[in-house]
Image (spheres, rainbow, N blue to C red):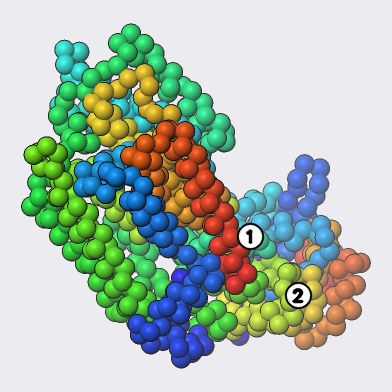
Amino acid sequence: MATDTPLLQLRDITKTFGSVQALTDVDFEARSGEVMALVGDNGAGKSTLVKCIAGSHSPDGGQILFEGEEVHINGPKVASKLGIEVVYQDLALCDNLDVVQNIYLGREEHDWFQRLKEPKMEQKTAETLKSLAVTTINSIRQPVATLSGGQRQSVAVAKAVQWNSKLVVLDEPTAALGVAQTEQVLALVRRLGEQGLAVVIISHNLHDIFETADRITVLRLGRNVGVFDRRTTSQQEVVSAITAGVPTKVSGLPATGVTA
Amino acid sequence: MSTADIVGQDAPPPPAEETPASIASIPRRAWDNIRTGNLGVLPIVVGMIFIVIFFGFKATNFFTATNFINIIIQMAGTTMLAYGVVFVLLLGEIDLSIGYVAGIGALAVAEFQLPGSGHDYNGLIAIVIAVVICGLIGLLQGAIVAFVGVPSFVVTLAGFLVWQGVILYRLEAPGSIIIQDRWINYTANYTFSWWLGWVIAAIICTGYALVTVFNVLGKRRAGLAVANPVMIIAKLGGVVAATVITVAICNHSDVQGTHLGLPLPGLIIVIFLALFTFLAKRTTFGRHVYAVGGNAEAARRAGINVPRIRVLVFIISGASAAIGGVILAANINSVGLTFPPATLLLNSIAAAVIGGVSLFGGRGEVRAAFLGSLVIATVANGLNTAGYSNGAIYIVTGIILLLAVTLDTFARRLQVRSGR
């Protein structure tokens, strides 16, 4: 399923905020058709890493390769042009707008007179939701304010994949959800991978990770302390990496540690 | 949102009683809407009926065609300002300057038609100049709000003082400027001949019908669910009836042998109603206004240029205030030290709020300005005709405003409870 060259490859990414070293020589990769989990304790550098991918931060050192070529993601627009979409924890939906309006927000289909092509957008939204097997929303013309947490997450994900994106990053997608809704969202995440997208999922919840991810990257104190294959790893191994992992490589030397 | 809007093959099959678009289902659906707090224009329509009946008994001259025309002329200025208020409120901002910006518009139009001043232009050109000046005022205020980040309340409060000052400064010596240009005065006082009134009514009705039909056809072609046809026809019927009755009553007016008809200001506010509704509901700009008002951060992340939207909205607010100011000044053929009336600003904000626009952004329709102004103008006119003082008008308008917002708050609570 996964291709040979990773879709996204980060090499020796370093980022400092003043005297705080947020990321030190971090390697990371995401492959098409694969769900990569990014885990770590609070302050491990997950958010900083995601912001480097999304273009909100630019790294101080290191290389980012996308589809094998070096890129400089120095803004969110560059990221979305490459096909990288991030679904943040707060989802960034407009409660007063309906599902179609939210999914097309900022990229509305319109004619030369700036007139909205509502039927076209509604049709395509229905198609997208169908392809993601999101069946719980009964009207895509109802305001997002009326949707449940899981439905809102589905809308946010649909918004991210609507634009032929290649890489979708999900930041704690199940954080505020109940059991049934969590299952729905996890199924949705797996489906994204099955459809050939590269998926990065950030989560604190190891159960969720082991339900969805193919591989797991563990960050600790701003360093990559290991990449694990879900099928050959136990939760204990991941937990001990999160709490006490040692960097898999020393600065300047190639990685030697546990790689799947 | 009607229940007939259920879309998507994955949607569970709608309950059987919701699909057939029969007349029998209307009362039940209407009751469903009321129960879930989805009131639409219902409270205003019911309120208007009560107001009209009350003053019909109370004031002898209320039910005359000439008074009907008066109400239209009296509401026109406030309505134009209220259109701008709707856009500003949709953003979640406020514009306290519009009253005196309307004053600046009126002053500009008076200045640029003033015979012998060296800059006396044709009235139509003077109107364009006034709109441009007030648009620039909106641009200035909007830019300070959007780029500097000063709260709109403060910026426009400053504008309130500054533009009032400019008007007083200019009019200190002359006291007032008489508007003689007939084009300017036409904006308030021109009435169409009876047959022209009917032509206009025909154009409005056909236009509305065509838009409705094209919308339905567009949805059909895309294979999407269409709203209940009975509801569509009812809405269409309502618009046609309102238009025809308005023109019919206006054409009946006779003041000492002089025939009056549909007043031009009535047509102006209807044209702007259509224009602004189109802008708000059918264009990317309008969609972005709602988005910024709903969640500015989400809008920014979606790539919307939020400051640009803010500035454009304040330009709309200034420019429509100018047109309102011109109509108000034309109605009294002059601009004086007491112009604009002190109630103008608060009435136009009240109009939008009575019509159902939220003060917190993202919720409301352009038609709210029209309906709210209609209520305010009718009450003021009715109390006047019945011989009450201005004090009574303020008290009643205030109570209506409070009632409208209270009702809206209850409706919102119902909506939340019913999961809407």
The residue that appears at 14% across and 50% down in the rendered structure is: B251
Residue A56 place in picture, x, y as percent? 62, 52
Residue picked out by circle 1: A53
Residue under mark 1: which chain is it in? A
Q: Nearer the viewer, residue A41 or A64?
A: A41
Q: How many marks?
A: 2
Q: Amino acid at mark 2?
A: Ile
Q: Nearer the viewer, residue B240 or A209?
A: B240
The residue that appears at 47% across and 65% down in the rendered structure is: B39
Residue A49 place in picture, x, y as percent? 70, 59
Q: Secondary structure at mark 1?
A: helix
Residue B60 place in picture, x, y as percent? 29, 45
Residue B209 place in picture, x, y as percent? 22, 67
Q: Secondary structure at mark 2?
A: strand
Crowding at label 2, few (<14), some or many (≥20) Cα neighbours within 10 Å? many
Which quarter of the figure has residue A146? Answer: bottom right
The residue that appears at 13% across and 43% down in the rendered structure is: B254
Residue B209: assigned label: none
- Vertical comparison of A85 with B173: above or below: below
Residue picked out by circle 2: A216
- Vertical comparison of B298 with B108: above or below: below
Q: Amino acid at mark 1?
A: Ile
Residue B140 shows up from this direction: no
Question: Do pointers 2 and 1 mark residues of a single chain?
Answer: yes
